[in-house]
Image (cartoon, rainbow, N blue to C red):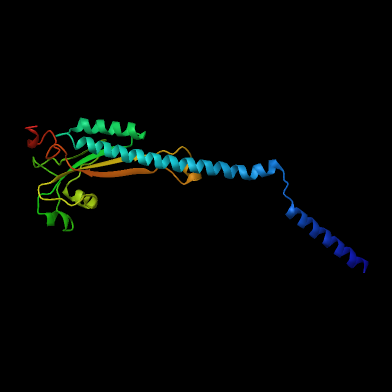
Amino acid sequence: MDHTTNAKGIWNRMCSRVADFARTESGTVTVESVIILPLLLFGLQATYAYFEAYRHQSLALKANYAIADYLSRIPAYDQSMVDGLDELFEYMTRSSESSWVRVTVVECKRSATKCNVEIPRKIHVPQPDGTLWNSHGSDGKLRHNNASLRAKLAHHIPKMYNGEHLIVVETSAQFRPTFAGRWTGIYRPEFLHISVTSPREHDTLCWPDEATCAGL
């Protein structure tokens, strides 16, 4: 009987202590700090990393639009200008030297149905001299020809009418996050943007070797 009473007393005391522990609101600051501080630092780090990535993406898009707007107002461009626009793009986006810019002129030489409805679309990269495509990039980026234009850019280009010229600007910015990707999930993304604009003050944007540049 005494053993049973003692066992119940011990059990009641244990339950009472557990209940008191569950109800208490006091704690040791050091222990709580050790638990919560890593979570707080991780949250701040992730917030900064994602904000920085979105800001960099926005800068890259704005820089692309700025380059496209400039090219739409001039009659001709050359390789020196493309390389200079690449340097300007790096400065505006604060990106690394691995960034690049490519400019491609697109022409609709067929009917609107062939240029817009048929698959693949019958749009062309002008080739006035029969050899040089009017598509040029920085850092040795390959030019587009008709096949690559239709395969890679056709879905970005709006509907065109016969004889219309459009300017396509492609830009790529390499983003280097401040914190390691294993902590935030953001490693080194490449922000690729494509914009299409119409020539504003001239019929087209030509390359100096083209005969169409002779009178400009």
The residue sitting at the right extreme is: 2
Most extreme residue toward the bottom is: 1
| Number of marks present in the image shown | 0
Q: Is residue 140 visible?
A: no
* Residue 215 horizontal/vertical position (percent): 6, 32
Q: Quadrant of residue 119?
A: bottom left
Image quarter for residue 8?
bottom right
Going by the image, does 211 lie left or right of 166? left
- Is 103 above or below relative to 116? above
Identify the residue shown where x is 87% and y is 62%: 9
Q: Residue at x 10, y 47 (%)?
A: 163
Q: Residue 149: x, y in percent?
A: 20, 48
Residue at the spot x=18%, y=52% of the render? 159
Quarter that holds the C terminus: top left
- Nearest the eye: 142 or 23: 23
User: Residue at the spot x=48%, y=45% of the render?
Assistant: 184
Q: Name the side, left or right, on which 4 lies relative to 126.
A: right
Q: Position of residue 198 (x, y in %)?
A: 18, 42
Q: Is residue 215 left or right of residue 92?
A: left
Q: Quadrant of the N terminus?
A: bottom right
**Residue 49 visible at all:** yes
**Where in the figure is residue 191, as x and y percent of width and height?**
34, 43
